[in-house]
Amino acid sequence: MKILSSHISLKNVRFHARHGVMSLERTVGADFTVNLTVSTDLSKAADSDNVDDTVNYAILYDILHEEMNIPSQLLEHVAARVARRILERFSHVKTVDIEITKCNPPMQADCDGAAVRMVFEQSSLGKA
């Protein structure tokens, strides 16, 4: 049996964070949801049943939580920081696909949120 692709995801992770261009957004904060998917070869973990052979999703959450707690003006900046840390921590991760949604953006629109989605690959990020 051959695994064609494998991913680990965190879905609709909720945060209250202080991201935004307006100073009030960085003071009061807003609600956000994050969807994160990393692609990596999980064939060893599938055979071994050992957490050391996979990308531990608890560590992914810790990285996400830490970076969401650092106020930023742009969600693009937050997404890049998260991806950089994951790619540095897990050298065998091929891609990081992250979508960050501000649930109630400060604009005159009736919508579920405003989001940025970015996909990074292991070689696409320089050192910050």
Image (cartoon, helix red, strand yellow):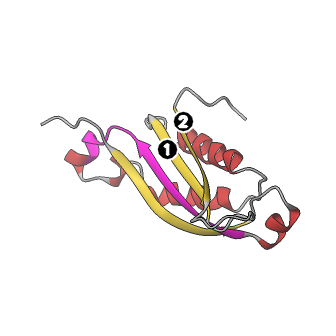
Counting from the top left corner in percent of width and height, residue 81 is at: 66, 45
Provide the residue designation for mark 1. 97
Query: Magenta residues?
Result: 30-45
Q: Amino acid at mark 2?
A: Phe
Which residue is at a point 80% across and 66% down the rendered structure image? 25
Counting from the top left corner in percent of width and height, residue 29 is at: 75, 70
Asked if the magenta segment contains residue 70, the reply would be no
Q: Amino acid at mark 1?
A: Asp
Secondary structure beneath label 2: strand
Count neighbours of disc 2 (C-alpha within 10 A) and say few if under 14, some if 14 to 19, many if 20 or more.
Answer: some
Provide the residue designation for mark 2. 120
Secondary structure beneath label 1: strand
Vertical placement of residue 97 versus 13, above or below: above
Which image quadrant for residue 103? Answer: bottom right
Q: Nearer the viewer, residue 35 or 122?
A: 35
Which residue is at a point 75% across and 65% down the rendered structure image? 106
The quadrant of the picture occupied by the N terminus is top left
User: Residue reaching furthest bottom?
Assistant: 28
Q: Marks 2 and 1: CB-CB under 8 Å?
A: yes
Which image quadrant for residue 27? Answer: bottom right
Counting from the top left corner in percent of width and height, residue 26 is at: 81, 64
